[in-house]
Image (spheres, rainbow, N blue to C red):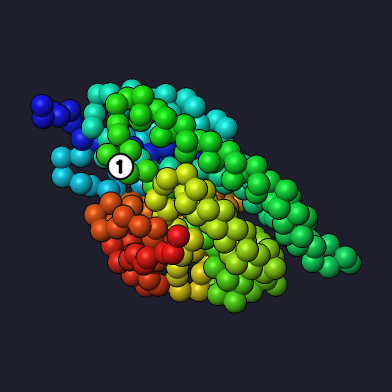
């Protein structure tokens, strides 16, 4: 008997896939009106000029599910995107989403499930906060005190638990799908990693010594040593660990570490818009909003609307073209529609 249920693709996990920061089209230091077109929540009303619920509906301040979240960008004909992801989720907190997935799996024929989780297991938000504080509290009599040595030690302690926790979450997704009547191989489970939010230190648009430029203008108040560590080690360790989980737990791996290449926060190849924002030249990561534009720190260092479009393109290409493990790559000076895939060895 033909299965007449509507088709669906589902996203599970944390803020990187829920759509947190989807309010923003790049970054602009302009603090007035629509911030040079970058603030999608601008209404123009004198009484209430900004309305984040236009972007996040009733999830403002909670799950932060945006109208441009990655799963909404897949755009497969006849397929409904279902965003169950929620900001702040760890692998241990996935059960509520998995229960919701089971309900969707009964009412729809789920073709694929994209999962982004693990960053909160290693304390990503705390790492960002402490590294910002380290830069902002510079004491010229002491000299630079980058945060990454202490943070690397903490990450090393948490990686094993992250691997085990994400593995259990993936197993629970498989179990929920089996209970809903799905056979192994009748759906795709894609575990993705995280895009590097910042470039190599050598590619930073402002030098470390330009404290006003990095802090007030560009929103990237970090030491070069911490930037380099985050790009080359932290993001790579997260990706390599998630790759190992995918191989061990019957999931496809989508490596996103290079997906924002040339569009990372403060990359010298990207720029803030002077007129209308452009996807090809903008940053795809929300800055640290120290100047104050009405956003929250919860949105900082997350894929903005352009970044979500790029991630959605990565996922769409994976669903259309690839069944093995793949990596997605951005192109400096090009829009999200130009990201491309490469095969990755198991």
Taking the spot 33% from the left edge, 70% from the top edge, the residue there is 334
Q: What x and y, as percent, mark residue 112?
A: 31, 41
Residue 295 shows up from this direction: no
Q: Secondary structure at mark 1?
A: loop
Q: Nearer the viewer, residue 56 or 189?
A: 189
- Farthest residue to the right: give it: 141
Q: What x and y, as percent, mark residue 210?
A: 66, 71
Q: Is residue 334 above or below residue 85?
A: below
Residue 267 shows up from this direction: yes
Rendered image quadrant of residue 105: top left
Q: Is residue 70 above or below residue 110?
A: below
- Farthest residue to the bottom: give it: 202
> In the image, is 3 to the left or to the right of 19?
left
Q: What x and y, as percent, mark residue 204?
A: 57, 72
Rendered image quadrant of residue 311: bottom left
Q: Which residue is mark 1?
A: 185
Taking the spot 44% from the left edge, 64% from the top edge, the residue there is 345
The quadrant of the picture occupied by the N terminus is top left
Taking the spot 45% from the left edge, 60% from the top edge, the residue there is 346
Q: Residues within 10 Å of mark 1 (few under 14, many from 20)?
A: few
């Amino acid at each position: 008997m033909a299965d007449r249920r509507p088709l669906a693709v589902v996203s599970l996990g944390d803020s990187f896939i829920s759509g947190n920061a989807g309010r923003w089209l790049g970054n602009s230091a302009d603090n007035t009106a629509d911030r040079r077109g970058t603030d999608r929540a601008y209404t123009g009303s004198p009484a209430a000029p900004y309305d984040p619920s236009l972007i996040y509906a009733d999830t403002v301040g909670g799950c932060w599910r945006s109208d441009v979240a990655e799963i909404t960008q897949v755009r497969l004909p006849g397929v409904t995107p279902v965003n169950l992801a929620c900001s702040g989720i760890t692998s241990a907190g996935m059960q509520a989403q998995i229960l919701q997935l089971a309900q969707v799996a009964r009412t729809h024929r789920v073709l694929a499930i994209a999962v982004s989780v693990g960053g909160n297991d290693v304390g990503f938000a705390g790492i960002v906060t402490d590294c910002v504080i380290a830069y902002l509290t510079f004491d010229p009599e002491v000299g630079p005190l980058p945060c990454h040595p202490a943070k690397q030690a903490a990450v090393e302690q948490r990686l094993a638990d992250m691997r085990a926790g994400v593995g259990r979450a993936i197993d629970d997704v498989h179990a929920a799908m089996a209970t809903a009547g799905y056979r192994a191989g009748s759906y795709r489970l894609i575990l993705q990693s995280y895009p590097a939010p910042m470039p190599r230190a050598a590619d930073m648009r402002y030098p470390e010594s330009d404290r006003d430029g990095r802090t007030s203008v560009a929103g990237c108040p970090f030491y070069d040593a911490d930037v380099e560590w985050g790009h080359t080690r932290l993001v790579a360790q997260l990706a390599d660990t998630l790759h190992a989980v995918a191989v061990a737990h019957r999931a496809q791996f989508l490596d996103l570490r290079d997906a924002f290449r040339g569009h990372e926060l403060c990359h010298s190849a990207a720029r803030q818009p002077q007129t209308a924002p452009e996807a090809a030249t903008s940053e795809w990561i929300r800055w640290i909003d120290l100047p104050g534009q009405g956003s929250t720190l919860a949105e900082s260092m997350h894929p903005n609307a352009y970044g979500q479009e790029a991630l959605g393109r990565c996922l769409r290409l994976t669903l259309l073209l690839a069944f093995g493990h793949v990596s997605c790559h951005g192109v400096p000076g090009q829009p999200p529609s130009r990201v491309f895939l490469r095969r990755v060895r198991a």
